[in-house]
Image (tube, rainbow, N blue to C red):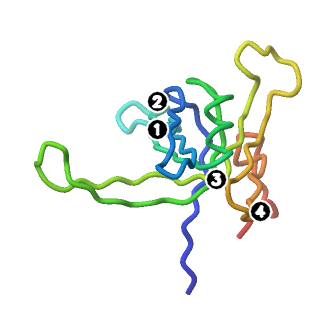
Amino acid sequence: MANINRVILVGNLTRDPELRATGSGLAVCTIRIAVNNRRKKGDTGEWVEEPNYFNVTTFGAQAENISRYLAKGRQVAVDGRLSWSEYEAKDGSGKRERVEVIADTVQFIGPREGGGNGGGGEYSAPASTPEPAADIPDAWAGGGATQDDDIPF
């Protein structure tokens, strides 16, 4: 059986992108996005939204574009994979674990900051490696109801 490691998220940046470079000069950008999970409270029956936070890392030209064009609060769609790592805590208290999303593509959603409602508000940063990118169906990005024919599996 094949292994699948794929993540698709649509959410808002919780802080401005952080751009840095590796020793060899490769651009690396990290962003943090919040994705709301809607659920019904058992005791009151009221619907509440609870945020989940995800660290996302991008590389190369995509990292530079994200750093240049995105800011806190901007909505994005991320397509990538999960990456798990382990490291030693700086205070020496033991090992820590981290799970992050390594993005293949990041699509900018909505108008630019101060851009109003005019067209041209979307930009899809190219992937740093030439891999085929899966399109995000409109229903997954909040564009409407999903029909059985729209489900890709």
Question: Label 4 belongs to which residue?
Answer: 148
Q: Is mark 3 on a helix, strand or loop?
A: strand
Q: Where is residue 151 in the image (x, y as percent from the top left)?
A: 74, 62
For label 1, the SS is: strand
Compute the Cα span from label 1 to label 3: 28 Å
**Mark 2 Cα shell of 10 Å, populated few (<14), some (14-19), many (≥20):** few
What residue sits right under mark 1 in the picture? Answer: 40
Q: What residue type is labelled 2?
A: Glu
Q: Earlier in the sequence, mark 1 or mark 3?
A: 1
Q: Can residue 111 be seen in this view?
A: yes
Residue at mark 4 to residue at mark 3: CA–CA distance: 22 Å
Residue 54: x %, y % from top left: 47, 43
Q: Residue at x 61, y 32 (%)?
A: 67
Instruction: Find numbered disc 2 in the image and state the secondary structure of the residue it sits on.
Output: loop
Distance Cα–Cα, label 2 vs label 1:
6 Å
- The answer to whether the residues at label 3 and label 2 have Cβ atoms under 8 Å apart is no
Are the residues tagged 2 and 1 within 8 Å (C-beta)? yes
Q: In which quarter of the image is the N terminus?
A: bottom right
Q: In this view, does 19 lie to the left or right of 50?
A: right
What residue sits 44% from the left and 39% below the top? Answer: 53
The residue tagged 3 is 79
Q: Residues within 10 Å of mark 3 (few under 14, many from 20)?
A: many
